Image (cartoon, rainbow, N blue to C red):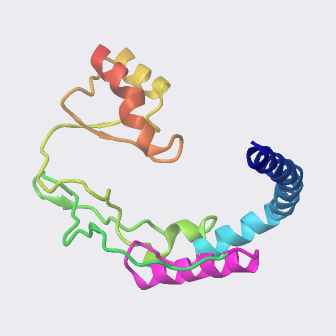
Amino acid sequence: MRSVLIASTLAAVALATVASVAPYSERRSEATFLRIPSSDGARASSQVINQGYHYAGTLGDYRLAAYMRDAMRGFGLRAWIEAFPATVYTPRVLQLQLLTSPVITFELHDQKIAADPDGSRPDAGLPFNAGSGNGDVRAPVVYVSRGLDADYATLAGASVSVRGRIVLIQYGAEYRATWPLARRQTVRQA
């Protein structure tokens, strides 16, 4: 019985010690990490990230990983680069054509934009969606401006349907991943 009482007393002291130390240590760690972020730091990191093409598996990808590792180490964290096998989709041919007479083949590289040099770098690569299937798609084309609800309403008001059509959307108003879900109801009603 006495050994149980001593063991429980030691356990209670140990728990009280851990409970009093952990919050202090945790608060100190939180305070340290809250001092690190700043708008200047975010801007500087963004500039480094946008300096070069860094698609998965490329030299630019490795350079960015090394930058991030070194930045984390600079904050006193243990950081390393861990390589692992992964499927990385890279298209062999990217082509957009309007099958008219004569056929029109579109340039897929963005044109230089003076106000946005990072967005129109020649090393940015061609636009593609990783995991997209191969194939030819042939259908009428509808331009939907920025692809917002108001744009679809304008088309509907002009009796233009997007059902069964290739929809061209000017990127920038919404993140592309939200388009399918956000517009599903709009297309169903068309």
Q: Residue at left 85%, top 63%?
A: 32
Residue 123 image-quadrant placement: bottom left
Vertical position of residue 97 compared to residue 121: above or below? above
Vertical position of residue 37 compared to residue 50: above or below? above
Q: Looking at the image, which is closer to me, 102 or 132?
A: 132
Tag count = 0
- Is 95 displayed left or right of 155 in the figure? left
Vertical position of residue 45 compared to residue 17: above or below? below
Residue sitting farthest toward the front: 1
| In magenta segment, residue 171 | no
Q: Position of residue 180 (x, y in %)?
A: 35, 34
Locate the N terminus and report the quarter of the image it occupies: top right
- Is 186 displayed left or right of 23 in the figure? left
- Residue 190 can be seen in this image: no
Q: Position of residue 126 (x, y in %)?
A: 34, 68
Q: Looking at the image, which is closer to me, 75 or 145?
A: 75
Q: Residue at left 43%, top 85%?
A: 59
Q: Looking at the image, which is closer to me, 125 or 58?
A: 58
Q: Position of residue 154 (x, y in %)?
A: 43, 22
- Is 126 displayed left or right of 113 in the figure? left
- Is 57 displayed left or right of 22 in the figure? left
Q: Residue at left 12%, top 58%?
A: 102
Magenta segment boundaries in residue numbering? 51-77
| In magenta segment, residue 68 | yes
- Residue 123 can be seen in this image: yes
Q: Residue at left 65%, top 76%?
A: 78
Q: Position of residue 186 (x, y in %)?
A: 36, 20
Locate the C terminus and report the quarter of the image it occupies: top left
